[in-house]
Every structure is written in C-alpha cells, then in structure tokens.
Image (spheres, rainbow, N blue to C red):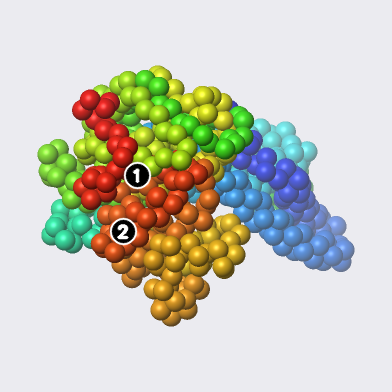
Amino acid sequence: MKKDRARLTYGTVFSVSYGRLVMVLAGTALLTAGNVYLRWSIGEALDTGKLHMSLLAVAGALLILAQAVSYIRQILFVKIQKNLFGRIQSKVLHGSMESLGRNDLGAVTALYTADVGQIDSFANRIVGKAFPDLAGWGITLGLLFWFDLYLGIASILVTVLPAIFLHRMSRPIAKGTGEYQEALEDANQSVITGLYNMESIKASCREENFLRDNEEKLAVLQKKKRKVAIWEALLGVPMLVSAFGTVVLLTALSGWLVLQGRITAGQLLTVVTLTDNIVTFVMSLDNTISVTRRASVSLQRLNAFLEEDQEREGGEEVGQIREIAFRNIRFAYPCRGGMEGVQSMKGIQSTDEVQSMEQERSIEDRSMEGVQSMDEEQSMEGTLSGEIYHGFSETWQRGNLYYVKGGNGEGKSTLIKLLMGIYDLLSGEILINGISSRQYSLTSLREKIVAVPQENVLFQGSIRDNLACGKEVSPQRMEEVCRKTGIHEEILRMPDGYETVLTENGGVLSGGQKQRLCLARALLREGEVYIFDEPTAALDKGNRERFAALLEELCKDRIVVVITHEKELLDGARRVTQIGGSGG
C-alpha cells in the first residue's frame, strides 16, 4: 500500500497561500510600527510643544491599512480550512479500506470539526493576535533600548521569565486535549449510530438504552473538557500577576530615570503609553501557548489519519472482460474494531442481526454502538474471527449467469469487495482475462464492474439525477431502462415525474421502488460485469419475474452474478456457487 508522506506541519498549514501570509504579516508590522510612531510623536510633542498635522494623515492611512489586512487575513483562513478539509476528504476517498477501518465515523467527524477547528484557532491566534503582539513588543523593545539600556533589559526580563514558566506549566493541556478528542470521537459515534438506526431504536423500544449510553459518553466528554479548562485557567493567574508587575516596574523605572536625567519627560510619557505593548504580549502568552498545545495534538491526530495507506494507483485499463477467476484466495478482515470502522464509513446501519449480536456482547456496554455495513450480512462478517476465505477458487465466464449462495457471515458480499479492489487478499489471486487484477487500474476496474448492494442507497436530488449518477444519459435511454425494471409508470405518476425531488435515501418511496430505481441506475452504467446482492428482497412476485427475465437478457454478452438465498431464484439456476462450508 502507498503511504501519504505529505505531513502536516505548522509551515504547511500556512503554505496554501504564502503570498497572502506575507501580505498579512507585512501589513501587521506596518500597523504596529505606525501605532508606536504615533505614540512616540505625541510624547515628543510634549517636549517641543509642536504637534504636526501630518500625524492625522498617518492615522487615516493606518485605518485603511487595518481594514485591508483584516480582509486578506480572512481569505487566508478560508484557504487554510479548505486545504485541511480537502486533505481529509481525499484520504476518505482514496485511502485503503483496511487502513480507514482503524477510524470509525465518529473519529472522522472529530477530525473535521474539532481538529480542523483547533488548527483554525491556532492560525487565527498566530496571525491575528500573537504576531501583532510580537511585532508590538519587538518594536517597543527596540525603542526602549534606544531610550535607555535599563528599560530594554527590564522589558526582556518581564517577558522571558513568564514565557519559560508558561511553557513548562502548559504541558498537561496537550495531554488533556488528546483525551478530550478521543472522548469526542466516542460521543460522536454514539450519536451517528443512533441517527442511522433510529427506526430500530424505536421499533425495539430501546430509547432508554440509547439515551443512557449517550449521557455516559457526554459525561466523560464534559469531564475531559473541564480538566483542560482548569489548567488553562491556572495559566491566567501568574500572567495577571506578571502583567501588573510589568506596569509597576517599567513605570517606576522610567520615573527614576527621569529624576536621574537619563530620559526626558516626553520619553517617560512614551514609555507609559507603550507599556501596554509589553503587557499585552505577556498577558496573551498563556492563550497563545494553550492554543499551540491544542493545535499540536490536532496536527498529530490529522497526520496519523492522513498517513494511513492509500489505495494502489496506476495500472492498465480494463478492456472487455471475458473471464474472472478466483485462485485459492485467502482473506480475513484486519480486526474487529477495524471492520466496524470501515462499516461506519459506509453510513448504513443494519437492524435485527446487529441487535442480536449486541445482546450477546452486552447490552449495557454496547447497547447502541451497532455495526454499520453495506448490508446486514456484512455486519455479521465483521464480527467473525479468523478468515472469511481460506482457499476459495471459482471461475466466471462471459455469457453466463451465476448464482452465489451461502449463510450469513460466510463472505458472499465480501467477494464483491475483493473483486473491486476495496480490500486486498492475504494470498491467492483474482485473474481477469488471465491477468492479475492488481495490474489493472482500480478506477477502470470499478467502471467495468457494476455492483448493486443489498441496501438501496439514494441521495437527495431528483429521480433523474439519482438514475444518471453524474453521467450524461439521454431521456429516451433512461425511460427504456426504467420500463425494463418496471418503475417507469410509477415515476410518471409522481408529482414531477423524473424531476421529482427525493429526500435522503429515497424518502417516502417503498422498498420495492427504491430497489427498482437502484437496479435501473445499475443498468444505465453499461458495465462488463454485473453483480447483484439480494436483488429481489423487496420485490413482489410480478417484479421478481420481470427481473429474472432481465437477467437472462443481460447475461447474453456479459458476466452476471446474483448473490441470493431466495429459493425461487436458486431452484431454476443452472450455475450455483456455494460460499461457506465446503465452498470456502
């Protein structure tokens, strides 16, 4: 598997737009320098009695510059967020399923929200507060050294000593943030599981279990957050004392230097007015260090996710598929937790079988955690230990219709994922036209192999968009296919026909309507191989007969595979492959 080596660092966070970053930093430095210049000029005016009107022009220019810097800074932050979101999305889409299995949907949502939010807060803090404070401190420090050596040395001492203290004292913040993010992942997963499985929760009267599970996780989350908040509050105490001491020290020292004749009264006023640049920098150190500590945890978490294995890239284009051969294949899911994570990425929740599994594990500990899968069968597969396949062999040839049967958890649906390269074999190989499937491009392979899962997934949008699925399809071709699946007339009876907008997952459509829409969508793909997983589960007798006739027509110049346990289909089948038992 290919590793993604593009690690996130503080530098790469800002690298999305170095030009804008330079503009923001330069503009901020000019604003700070202009502010110091205005205060110094006012102090000098007390000695000379002259206040130059040109200062008004400088003040006006600084106001305009401040608005420009603010605008550019906001654009920079948007680009930083876009870059982080893009990296996560790319990993979700192109990462290998084995590696993604180590991150459930709760973990991924925590990355999107909490971790990206922490890094966004860090960027805002550094560019919007820490750098302006640093620039103000640096310019003021230079001016105080110019006034008198003692003033410069005192300014350094009141800054460096608290910074060293804060650095050491803030270490528990990073540990607490990491624990909080882990608790957030768990809480997110609990809520997501409930949302996907709400029908089962209500049907089985398990609302109390769900609420209790969520309350426990939220209580842990609150405890972790409180721990971080306490440490951050503790950091503010010494900084408040330090800021007060800075004001007293610099004011008293400046007064003494005036009495000694080492600085003028105007310089004394300048020191007093510029003391806030020193105090502000010292006061903000605790927040800056806290934000940096939290961001470092988020960077580590994001990098751990982004460095997961990639799917293989490159390979030959797949031509006409004449034969698919499985040769002594062995496969086992990486681990139980990993499998559940992969299933969570699919965003589909199984029902009765998951509930029975949960009861076996422990209702108290796992009452609503669930296992999310492409189908109910896969949820069973994910819980098994050992291999799903241990030496399975089979050959499918063009122009034939094959049926695959087997018990729950014996790997029928897993076979689709292995063929499409979603998972990698432990050993053995899958040959396409006598060539290992590993030599083919995954994109090309998935274009040629059309798999229709048991769960009928429809997205929010019109029926036409759901059927076309992002491709150009003529209305005539779409209607022709829908007639074959028996859904055309029902679509025409809907309020807006093919333009009827569906809600997420089909909304009010019946199970049979959803299934026939998904079958029509698959036929519009015009692949070389069709694999149907329990395609007649929601169809009535008439539509089952229609589908059976469609299969006979479809297999004349393609490889067609039907995964089913329907007796009616199997009774008339000529080629049946047994999965499990003696079949592997």
The mark that comes first in sequence, 1 or 2, is 2
Residue at position x 33%, y 70% in the image: 508
- Measuring from the top left, give residue 392's x and y in whole percent: 33, 24
Q: Which mark is residue 84?
A: none
Closer-to-camera residue (148/242): 242
Residue at position x 30%, y 34% in the image: 577
User: The C terminus appears in which quarter of the rendering?
Assistant: top left
Residue at position x 64%, y 56% in the image: 74
Q: Name the side, left or right, on which 557 lies relative to 227.
A: right
Closer-to-camera residue (216/508): 508
Closer-to-camera residue (479/58): 479
Tell me the residue that label 1 is attached to: 562
Tell me the residue that label 2 is attached to: 545
- Measuring from the top left, give residue 575's x and y in whole percent: 32, 37
- Measuring from the top left, give residue 201's x and y in whole percent: 19, 57
Give SS at disc 1: strand
